[in-house]
Amino acid sequence: EYGITRPAGYKVSFHYNSQVEDMHFGKTHPMKPWRLTLTKHLVLGCGLQYAMDTFEAVSATKEQVRAFHDPDYVDFLAEVSPGTFEELCKMPRFASHAPPKHDYDAVDLGPFNLSTSPGADCPVFDGMSKYLFLYTGATLAATNQLTTNQSDIAINWSGGLHHAHRAEASGFCYINDIVLSIVDMLRVYPRVLYVDIDVHHGDGVEEAFQRQPRVMTLSYHRYGPYDDTGHKFFPGTGDLTDVGLKGTVGEHFALNVPIPSGIDDRQYKYLYESITGRTIEAFKPSAIVLQCGADSLGGDRLGQFNINIKQHGECVSFVKNMGLPLLLLGGGGYTARNVARAWCHETALATDNVLPDNIPMDLVPRPEAFMGRAHGEGKMYPAFNRLHVNDCKDSDLEYMVKRLDN
Ligand code: TV7
Ligand code: CA
Ligand code: ZN
């Protein structure tokens, strides 16, 4: 349709299972799995399936998930549903995992930071187990394509859930598919670089590998107080001084780029390319995992950056140009139409295709109006409805680059 061709000299695989789309975290919850429906429709509408090998994902097994997560937690996730939650909570094996109460939290939290209250970050919802094990299965299949040299780039837009801890759900993330992928990669690659352009700090991945010099984690994120409530932008970690666990061999194998609100394309490009470039030079990774959270786009419901789809995509192109095995994962992204446009554009970049500027639907007023349509009209690159005040001083950004360039 748009003259889509296969990339010359390398192979891309795309991993997905449409069953993840039907899930609902709750009426007002910002995480909307149907953003993946939009993405799928755009990707297929553009004909990008002809440029890559597409795989229907199957669920990860409990055993695979235990490669990082606590066995009790894995059993709980496999069995839990709104109907079984209360029952499971009473079982001593699970009850012992109840989280400490946070004062700011109005909702009741059960074991593993899970909850059936509608206001919870990590609610228990219908079909949840299916959803979790499917997005994880897709990431592991994508990883397998890379480690067996069957693909050069592998994509799973339903993965990238970077906040999940060993025995705790956090920030809309339950199973840390990224950690599971990297653990698997370490069987074959000497060194893996993890880069995270989600607007939130990739704390779960950083923590998992804080003692591991074979994995370097690099996260770009909004950091600091986010309004006058005194609360920090979630999860509140990822300061410039946080460089891995001090006194272990993992020290200096984590980097964090804390960013004030409103950063624009030019400033983001400067930070991203100087710091990612230097990191690759020094660390010499054997493979790269890029978490492409689309909540770093301008106009995101939760994010506070002002970057456009074009720059977001250039972050993908930049690491792709290193010519290393590359895993592309999704993550956050709360203005669904922008998420779909960004990830479709990035699927095109991964396969060396250029989409005309006017494909996807700038004119789509409401996401619902778009459902069921392949694509609308409008411009792809120009961006957003709501601009954040730019609190980034060029001199501060330059200082940060120098500081990180040991
Ligand atoms: C990867 N921000 C995940 C990002 C996770 C962010 C948060 C919400 C939120 C939750 C809701 C909701 C919300 C409008 C926004 C300190 C709290 C404050 C719960 C209300 N509306 C990723 C997680 C972050 C849930 N959490 O990186 C149900 O916003 O700030 C917090 C923690 C305690 C819990 N409360 C929020 O992008 C995928 N949550 C509406 C309904
Ligand atoms: Ca990040
Ligand atoms: Zn995020």
Image (cartoon, rainbow, N blue to C red):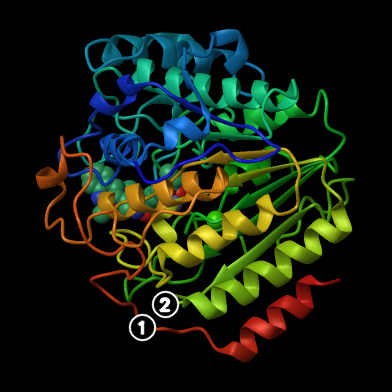
Is the residue under label 2 in contact with that under label 1 (CB below 8 Å)? Answer: yes
Q: Which residue is mark 2?
A: 262
Could you tell me which residue is drawn at 29 percent across and 9 percent down?
A: 87
Q: Secondary structure at mark 2?
A: loop
The disc label shown at residue 389, or none: 1
Could you tell me which residue is drawn at 43 percent across and 37 percent down?
A: 48
Could you tell me which residue is drawn at 38 percent across and 68 percent down?
A: 304
Characterize the local packing of mark 2: few (<14), some (14-19) or many (20 or more) Cα atoms within 10 angstroms: many
In which image quadrant can residue 78 be found? top left
Q: Which residue type does callout 2 highlight?
A: Gly
Residue 184 x %, y % = 72, 24
Q: Is mark 1 within 8 Å of ligand 1?
A: no
The reply, left or right, for residue 274 in relation to residue 369 is: right
The disc label shown at residue 246, or none: none
Residue 126 x %, y % = 24, 19
Of residues 18 and 209, the one drawn nearer to the viewer in this rendering = 18
